[in-house]
Amino acid sequence: MATISEILEPKAKKSDLSKYNHLLKSIVGNSPDVIYLLDKNGKIEFISEAISTYGYKSTELIGKNIFDLVHPDDRKKALYKINERRTGKRSTKTLEIRLITKGNKTIPFETNITGFKTDAVFSINAEGVYNDDKTVTENFSGTQGMARDITVRKKLESILKIAYENLEDEVQNRTKDLTETNKSLIAENSKRRKAEKKLAQSNDSYKLLFNSINEAMFVCDLETNTILEVNKAVCDHLSFSKDELVGHSLFELIDPESLLDVPFFDQHKLEKFVDEKHTTFQTTYISKHGDKIPFEVNAYVFEQKGKMRVLAVSQSMNDKLTTEQHLRRYSNKLEKEVSTRTERIKYLENQRNEIKKITALGRMAAQVAHEINNPLAGIKNSFLLIKEAINPNHRYSKYSEKIEKEIERIANIVRQMFDLYRPGETPVKEYNINSPINDVITLLGPKCLDANIKVNYKPKSKFKVRVPEGLIRQVLFNLIKNAIEASPQNGSVDCHLSKTDREFTISVIDYGQGISEEDKEKVFEPFYSKKTGNKTEGMGLGLAISKEIVEAFNGTLNFKANKEKGTVFEVTLPLQTES
């Protein structure tokens, strides 16, 4: 009876190589993985029937370029990786590409070249094929590889189990067939040598396939528990060489504390295992360095010429836990992102409602202003006639001045209400920003004298801007006037100017009582004012109009609490705007 070690032995008998060729064809034909062979130009020379899962027939793909199946966005990097193998020096691991099915659906693949680690949904394992009698560059003759769908991993395990069950019978059948065939091939030595070369390549492909599986795989005798074969993943995980493992008992590798979990260690569990042909359990292997590594094992029992064998496919629990942790972190991140997006949507919805509210109020204000403006003009004109007719020495003459001021105040309020909804266009020219700031401070000088408040501002030299000057004056007037009114007697107001390459900021700072938490959300609402009872009481439109003006020119108007005391209002505008 032959073992896998004998199958993989490069110096095996020529007749045995021919015999095992039939076995390899059986594995390729029944494998759920897509096994392929390309020439050096990337054209398909062979591809297994597993490709039919994705809508293709293997015969229709022969002669076509492999890149016809690769997503256009991935072709460049796939070509680069294949060209690396022309030097015979480099290997590439974990290259992700996508496969286009016949129905134009895209399937993600993860390509592993010579490394054969499968972490994604699909993986392609490939290596260069070389001719030994040529130079490193010239000896590249093609690529052989395997495209693997991870979801059918269980099918692969089943295929390997069946391969072990039928190995002895297949060897005998192939031996008989090849013995008869050899009688007719005695005179055809050259053809036979070519067949032997192809069989050697097939044997290498089988070895490549067996060792490319990422799970640690043991083949053991069920009666003696002797290890008959292991793949490369076993050696990688446990730090043993293959020679150090084959011929020894599997139980020597298992932590004594977890031996009872092994179904073929306990007689009762063994009978059930043999009857059901498959079981899954967890155990702990001990590495060469004494490390205890937990594994999840899928074990299959099969008969091979009267002897019971076990195929144990073992996955490291550490790898599994790492994957679960990654999935958990991704899930938490996704939930957090959904929560953030939900809050953002709520915020935008509230903003939209506020905009609707301001728009409605502005429209109403403009309509009211329009209706009031006409009769107000009549009242003003009529009053001017009456004022001229009143004798300046009349005892009620002093009230005419007060009436005129109140009429002008009403007219000013009407203009503010109208500007809130339709501020109109203002011409734009370049000027020194210091000019409107100084003008507004001078204009508010009498108001500062009444409360003995000093406005501090240090002009900046060569500070040119191109924004509507009239509207800037209106905004500054509202902000500095509010700061003066919020300041205590004998206090001060500070104005600062700063800029970057694209924008400038004017800060107006008062040292008053500040803005309460409940008032912060209402500061920019039209008709909202905290000046009730104050002789300077207004309509509560100043900040609303100012914010409307600033945002109309892609700027911002914000406020924050001063570190010492009071409030800081900041106006930020582009250095240049259109009218």
Image: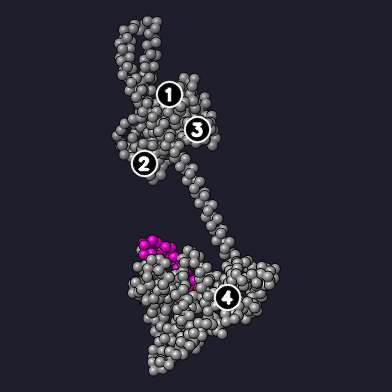
In the image, which disc is placed on residue 302?
4
Q: Amino acid at mark 1?
A: Met
Name the residue: 41% across, 72% down. Answer: 49
> Badge 4: how crowded within 10 Å, few (<14), some, or many (20+)?
many
Q: Residues within 10 Å of mark 2 (few under 14, many from 20)?
A: some
Disc number placed over residue 575 in the picture, else none? 2
Label for residue 345?
Answer: none
Image: magenta residue range: 93-117
Q: Nearer the viewer, mark 1 or mark 2?
A: 1
Mark 3, residue position? 520
Identify residue for label 1: 539
Coordinates of residue 333 in the picture (x, y in percent): 52, 52
Label 4 vs label 3: CA separation? 78 Å
Query: Mark 2: which amino acid?
Result: Leu
- x and y percentages locating residue 46 in the rendered image: 39, 76
Q: Residue furthest right?
A: 257
Q: CA distance from mark 3 to mark 2?
A: 28 Å
